[in-house]
Image (cartoon, helix red, strand yellow):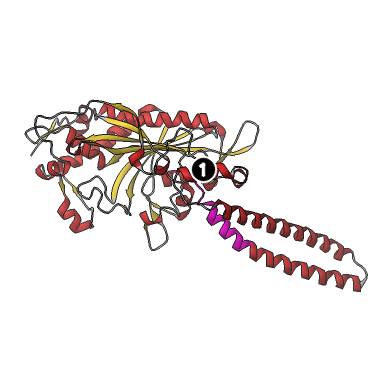
Amino acid sequence: MLDIKFIRENIDLVKDGARKKHIVLNIDELITADEERRKLLSSIEGKRTAQNQFSEKIAKATVPEERAAMIAEMKTLKEGMQKEEEQLKEVMKKWQGLMVQVPNIPDMTVPEGASDAENKEVRAWGTVPTFDFKPKSHVELMEALDLADFERGAKVSGFRGYFLKNDAVLLNFALWQFAFDHIIAKGGFTPMIVPSLVRREPFVGTGYLPQSEDDLYKTQDGEYLAGTGEVATMGYYMDEIIDKKKLPLKFVSFSPCFRREAGSHGKQTKGIYRVHEFFKFEQVILCEANHAESVKFHEELTQNAEEILQALKLPYHVVVNCGGDLGLGQVKKYDIEAWIPSESRFGETHSSSYFHDFQTRRLNIRYKDDEGKMKFTHSLNNTAIASPRILISVLENYQQADGTILVPDVLQKYMGGKKVIGK
């Protein structure tokens, strides 16, 4: 959430940010609602001051007639104040509804564009493999080697359901443990297992509500199932003041994740690229309210994820997301995409974003700077590893002509020394 004072003083900048993100926003309606809010607040405060003054005068009044007149006048004042307070409730509801729709302003380095098709490559790593045979898809490989059962997955779980089996399970756990060990070895990260079942407030705070409600699973008790550990991790310090000496706070959070994939019908329906239930290790950082700090940690988190792919020897490239492919709160975002041989394309495996104080203002996460001034921290997040999607690139890039799959060197110790996955 942006500061309303900032919005009022930078209307054109906010409008241009919404334009760049391709978000429809009626900023003029918000300003009108804010003026009404401010007017009512001022009037109510004036009446409250007058009421206090009347109370003092009534207490000192000695003439019965004067006392009765003042009581009557104060009653009229109180009735007017109560009426305005009711009006304020409605105005605040409208104002708050409009405020949570205002997008964060993208960084000047974010390219123009309406969709992910217009994201720009920043760098690439590794050599795209060439095969002397036609590479199989991960679906073909997994079914041939009894690594997954998609038919029974759909029978049990519904559309996009899956069972991982045998060495795919070992490989999945190996990837988790390797990525976790890699991040912990960087130092400074607090490991956490965080809830997937989360109350509404952290979703609103992180910007997933109300905009992305269609993509969330909701329980009959009013909680939601999170599509990323970022939501619960950001809620950890909600409504708290953090000691500045503890900043930056770094977390690597594990959680099951759930997404309805609303609007993605027909996209990657086969296999494990786009599923409703998956697992993630998420990196989250809270740092001082300083743009340079945010940029520094954004690059650091991205590098952590790149190092994981480099250790796995998976070719990938990094793209900077265009304005239309940014979320409501993101200032800047990188997607890291690993090579998928069967499709001759890169597919997203990681995303890395920073938000300035957009999320922390909503979540009320603050600290006192060296001058004692209260400030909202900045926030960042990045995928460390997400499965089962990462299995696609591992299986396809390491496939052999005989249908077997080599186990990446860095994962072999986590799989009991196994070097090859075969029948």
Q: Along the line of sight, which residue is nearer the eye, 307 or 80?
A: 80
Tell me the SS state at disc 1.
helix
Residue 203, position as x, y percentages in the image: 45, 51
Q: Nearer the viewer, residue 406 or 264?
A: 264
Residue 380, horizontal then vertical, whole percent = 45, 37
User: Where residue 250 sits: x, y (%)?
Assistant: 44, 34
Name the residue: 64% across, 61% down: 88
202 lies left or right of 181? right
Residue plotted at (44% across, 35% down): 110
Q: Position of residue 121 (x, y in %)?
A: 34, 31
Q: Residue furthest left?
A: 402
In-front residue for pair 20/169? 20
Asked if the stretch drawn in magenta spans residue 272, the answer is: no
Magenta: predominant secondary structure element? helix
Q: Is residue 161 above or below residue 339?
A: below
Mark 1 residue type? Asp
Q: Decide: few, some or many residues near mark 1? Use Cα within 10 Å; few <14, some 14-19, many ≥20.
A: few
Above or below, 121 relative to 253: above
Does the stretch in magenta take in 100?
A: yes
The part of the image, by quadrant, that contains residue 285 is top left
Residue 216 appears in the picture as rendered: no
- Residue at image x 18%, y 35%? 341
Residue 224 placement: quadrant = bottom left
Range drawn in magenta: 88-104
> Label 1, on which residue?
16
